[in-house]
Image (cartoon, rainbow, N blue to C red):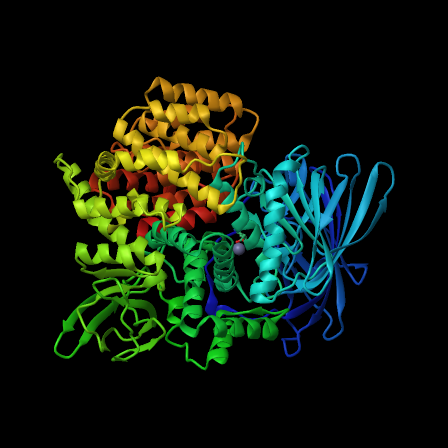
Amino acid sequence: MRTDQGQVVNLADYRPTDFVLERVDLTFELDPTATKVEARLIFHRREGSDLKASLVLDGDELSLAGLLLDQVEMPAEQYTATADSLTVRDLPAAAPFELTITTIINPEANTQLMGLYRTGGVYCTQCEAEGFRRITYFPDRPDVLAPYTVNIIADKAANPLLLSNGNFLGGAGYGEGKHFAAWFDPHPKPSYLFALVAGDLGVVEDTFTTMSGREVALKIYVEHGKEPRATYAMDALKRSMKWDEEVFGREYDLDIFMIVAVSDFNMGAMENKGLNIFNDKYVLADPETATDADYANIEAIIAHEYFHNWTGNRITCRDWFQLCLKEGLTVYRDQEFSSDQRSRAVQRIADVRHLKSEQFPEDGGPLAHPVRPTKYREINNFYTRTVYEKGAEVTRMIATLVGAQTFRKGMDIYFDRHDGQAVTIEDFVKCFEDASGRDLTQFSLWYHQAGTPLVTASGSYDAAASTFSLSLEQMVPATPGQPTKEPLHIPLRIALLGHNGSQFATKTVTGAEITGDVLHLIGRSQTAVFHGISSRPVVSINRSFSAPINLQFDQSEADLALIAHHETDNFARWQALTDLALPNLLQAARDARVEKQVTCDATFIDALLAAAQDDSLEPAFRTQALALPGEADIARELGSNNDPDAIHAGRQAVLSLIAAAGMDVFETLHKAMATPGEFRPAAADAGRRALRNAALTFLSYADNAPGRAKAAFDNATNMTDLGHALSILAHRFPDSAEAAYALDAFRDRFADNALVIDKWFAIQAGTPGAATLDRVLKLMENPSFKRSNPNRVRALVGTFAFTNSTGFNRADGAGYRLLAKEILDIDPRNPQLAARLLTAMRSWRSLEPVRADHARSALMEIERANGLSTDVRDIVERVLKG
Ligand code: B3K
Ligand code: ZN
């Protein structure tokens, strides 16, 4: 029975609890189908709160098996227990009291993967956001912080390992065949950071000595036999710990830090205090089974969860509206870590690509919401690109506005002032106001206004006065619930380049504040006049993507080519190449739609090939230059009445034209970028592999034959090269004997490795064209496909719906119907997973009318279904309405 009614929660209604929780003492007697949970909670009434107030605890699908007040059974008339709450009346006025609550839960039947569940014979938990209430009745909200003691009793043979948060207190035998372990976490924490793991797992161990000289035990638990595949994760963990000390002055604070990898998990990973739980996809890697992208993801996610120890755990959120306080900030921190470990420019390009392809459509569609929302119906639906990635951009803009040193000073104030507290975005921003002396009131609108701002720029040069005027105008589009917007404080990094590529000094400016290269756009429209500019400059605006905006600025191809060649900010060089590419891709889509021959501009192809061959640029950067804007980017630029087939065909034609023009370049690169010797996952080698594989892709367009990809498949010595060759075969030559051979060989070789079989599913689900739908249906019958496992579902159904624009958006609507059917099938078991998949439909209104009609029908079919979860109902209604 569903117990959650899905009422709307409003930020404005926030108030602290009437009772203060002092301590939590939990005892678990683990059993696969009947786990007994005894929670001893010590409370006292908050000073000044209503003396008659009852204590109301949250529950979800719970039934009460016992209730004691100060160790005495509570009379039935003093409390009311339902599946989703426990209300206790007539509690002591001042003195602390102890409630002992007993519940019996069934981990085996928990298919939602929230609360305590079983995966691969292991007990594990996921409590964020509201999973703890599926374990026991509790004030399950992030502003209730307490130290926890956890006792775990379980069958010893099946569960040699008994883990929870904090430090290990001790353990011993416990009657026949059983044992127990006790853990104590001294750091007050909210319930969403609780974790428990029990089972039989292998371990990789190491230690880390903190900057104050304490030795911390590090343990990564994985399935037996997979230990060698966890060594990269361990290395990434140690580098993360060191980096947080060096860059943010943050030291780890327990005797032990543990990571457990499990195979059934709703998301990437979870930052539970001292006991992170990970989707094994983001822990396990070796050259044979993981791509360079997998390695980079593992590094980033290990770092992200570790960094939460300070940004999220030591200082947490007052309520879930403040989610970006921990997520946006921690994404910013992991992006900075990856930049320092790898290449800053390439990391920025990758992050911006991701932001534009994922967050911009969210911000421009029916699911748009502010970085800090003011209402929600289902909080799990707000773990969005906006909260995470735009939240990171907002943090980055604060750093840009106040400067690196002052940003660090503000972070130090934040950690000093709020350690051990549950705080708000206002508290966070105040630290930077105090550090900088700058008023961030207008800037804070970035947290409150949804929508991607559009900045329109135009320039004019006055030779007689040696001045250059840059006029800027900003507009934030209307979004659901926010019809009108105020102007934002937008930090725009700017450079003025002379015709030989040198930079003009931009110190003397009137009409706008400029600090360093940051121009502060604060008005709805504003003209900045740069003085002492001796010739017409070429302007580079929004260097490093200093603000997450759309920029409209008519620049000639010659100017863009100059930026692509001479900017000292490598991100801006990449942006200029993209700006050269985009009009070609848009025109190609229009031409393909009317079956007109696609042509391409020579300046663009020349600039692209020049960048590809420029040995002064790192290979990873050159790869990014060659990776043209994707189909989703083109669709977003076109805006409405989109035909995914035409967008795809146009882009393919452009790729073929580049391939034909650059055949020799790609031949040379393919040879030159080989990485002989032992496989190293480090960024430099990964960059060479990426560029070599990009060259191979273009060669496959030039040849229009599968031969080279087949040879690459046969000769590959690592998963990056093998997977890439397989993708070329499956995507470019799906009906060839070579593709069939390679797909079979790949499946047979990795049949017992589910994470690699996911790649096999994903590659096939990503094959462009209408025929893929039947292939997806067939793959669903494959014994390796398990609908109960989120990774399998995401690999097959998720890849199809999110990345295969021609397959999913088949003109007959069959793609939407398939997704609707899957969602209705998954929803009763795992609403979070179902709701996430459904967001693939968020841009349906920008499709041409025939497809849009089919999409609407599929959405309405979902909306009409009986017994929908709050998660899916919330998304479907917003997607249809917005
Ligand atoms: N904090 C978790 C996400 C929890 C999602 C709950 N629906 C992982 C992370 O962002 O680090
Ligand atoms: Zn996070």
How far across and down, in percent of the image, does residue 733 sit? 32, 25
- Vertically, is 12 above or below 351? below
Check the picture and name the quadrant holding the C terminus: bottom left
Residue 725 visible, this orientation: yes
How far across and down, in percent of the image, does residue 23 sit? 73, 64
Foreground of the two, 611 or 541: 611
Foreground of the two, 370 or 200: 200
Residue at 76% from the left image edge and 63% from the top image edge: 98
- Vertically, is 823 above or below 193? above
Foreground of the two, 800 or 542: 542
Say left or right for 699 vs 96: left
- The image quadrant of residue 284 is top right
How far across and down, in percent of the image, does residue 31 sit? 73, 39
Foreground of the two, 801 or 560: 560
Say left or right for 773 vs 746: left
Say left or right for 638 vs 9: left
Residue at 69% from the left image edge and 45% from the top image edge: 197
Residue 769 visible, this orientation: no
Check the picture and name the quadrant holding the N terminus: top right
